[in-house]
Image: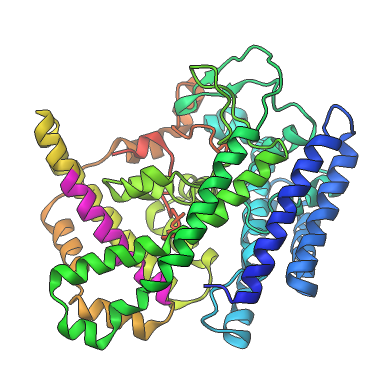
Amino acid sequence: MPGTGSTVNFVVCQLFALLAAIWFRTYLHSSKTSSFIRHVVATLLGLYLALFCFGWYALHFLVQSGISYCIMIIIGVENMHKYCFVFALGYLTVCQVTRVYIFDYGQYSADFSGPMMIITQKITSLAYEIHDGMFRKDEELTSSQRDLAVRRMPSLLEYLSYNCNFMGILAGPLCSYKDYITFIEGRSYHTTQSGENGKEEIQSERTEPSPNTAVIQKLLVCGLSLLFHLTISTTLPVEYNIDEHFQATASWPTKIIYLYISLLAARPKYYFAWTLADAINNAAGFGFRGYDKNGAARWDLISNLRIQQIEMSTSFKMFLDNWNIQTALWLKRVCYERASFSPTIQTFILSAIWHGVYPGYYLTFLTGVLMTLAARAMRNNFRHYFIEPSQLKLLYDVITWIVTQVAVSYTVVPFVLLSVKPSFTFYSSWYYSLHILGILVLLLFPVKKTQGRKNAHENIQLSQSKKFDEGEHSLGRNSFSITNNVCNQNQEIASRHSSLKQ
């Protein structure tokens, strides 16, 4: 958890950002103000918040963004995405190593490397989008890559505004460059919106919808999450799972139940931070994703999680697909879709590197690879036997919910404990049972070649025929964090790719 001082700073700055967002939408609306002014104000407010919250460490944001922009200009569109990726991720890693091993090991806090993680996502995703839009041919791109492709080099102001605007500098979430520019220029309500499963819905021009209802609802979720965290989370520490007395005296059912409850109690702080960040963007007028079939406005374009789906997940993939959504999409776009071999493993490794340098992150993500592959093998080999009748399907859902929640909790304990010794203490107290079970599943049950694997080799042909539909419903235009959660959708997983659905 963050230290008290940094937590207070973070909350105060985010509440200020919320008020600033309301002011920004009211007095600097695109119908009243030029895009230039909106970019300038959004950038200056963002840098002010960063300076207030992190002091002169906030200069790292400008250094990372500035050097990355120079790389884009100097290297050229053919290879700049590779250089930007290596530099941005390398710079982030150096800062994380410095903070963790020189300043405050074990303080998993809202330190300056937190915003740098989001900026790193923005730098790398934009570099790939420019590469796709200005160098690659359209027929070489998937449908989502074509939608996100950037056809001209951003100006320095646009670049800094995208990376450092006040709405997302402290906690994100990641958004695509095109969505952000569309918002700044006031075209969010007059463009074609993406419907469910990424299918286009041509919307007739309507009056600009108000985000007030969505903002209020999200602030209520924030309040409940904060209350839950302050009253319950602190009384159910994850560290108690490795308490010697507890390990020696607790029965196995008690250990399993406490493991689940302690990790359940650890999640509200993420619910609070991510939902508040989403509400801030909505309050400024950013995050509109068209209308549903009933004509109601949807404000989930850059939402980062779906709490109900997370808590009711019946598969590892379902959990990851709804946790730290924008990070999952970033991992999918810059790694999974472009990996030449072992995309799942490469994606988990990138997720671990991006999260930081604590050994617990790597233990979590390596375990996550095993759990993901084992869960896929079980699902592919057995799920079709439990579709009918409905009572059998219900039984299957209940069992898979229990297994999923326990497996996720087991996987992410090192992510919370951070260090090697306590992480191995926990796993040894469980006799590495789920690791062994996962390996046995992979040895005993063949992983059938999924449609997702086939599509990985057929993307070009499918995109040429323009029939390739990636179920990446525009949600962030489109993890967990295993994301950052849980690890951080991670992840092929991280994939909102319909072809990956099992």
Was residue 454 drawn as part of the magenta stretch in this picture? Answer: no
What colour scheme was applied to this rendering of the protein?
Answer: rainbow
| Residue nearest the viewer, comparing 179 with 237 | 237
Residue 362 position (above or below residue 329)? below
Q: What's the residue at 23%, 87% (across, down)? A: 245
**Residue 83 placement, left or right of 441:** right
| Residue nearest the viewer, comparing 187 with 362 | 187
Quarter holding the C terminus? top left
The image quadrant of residue 53 is bottom right
Q: Position of residue 374 (x, y in %)?
A: 22, 55
Q: From where the camera sits, is residue 130 visible?
A: yes
| Residue nearest the viewer, comparing 233 with 116 | 233
**Residue 14 placement, left or right of 465:** right
The image quadrant of residue 301 is top right
Which portion, as a residue range, is magenta? 398-417
| Residue nearest the viewer, comparing 211 with 138 | 211
Q: What's the residue at 67%, 43% (across, down)? A: 281
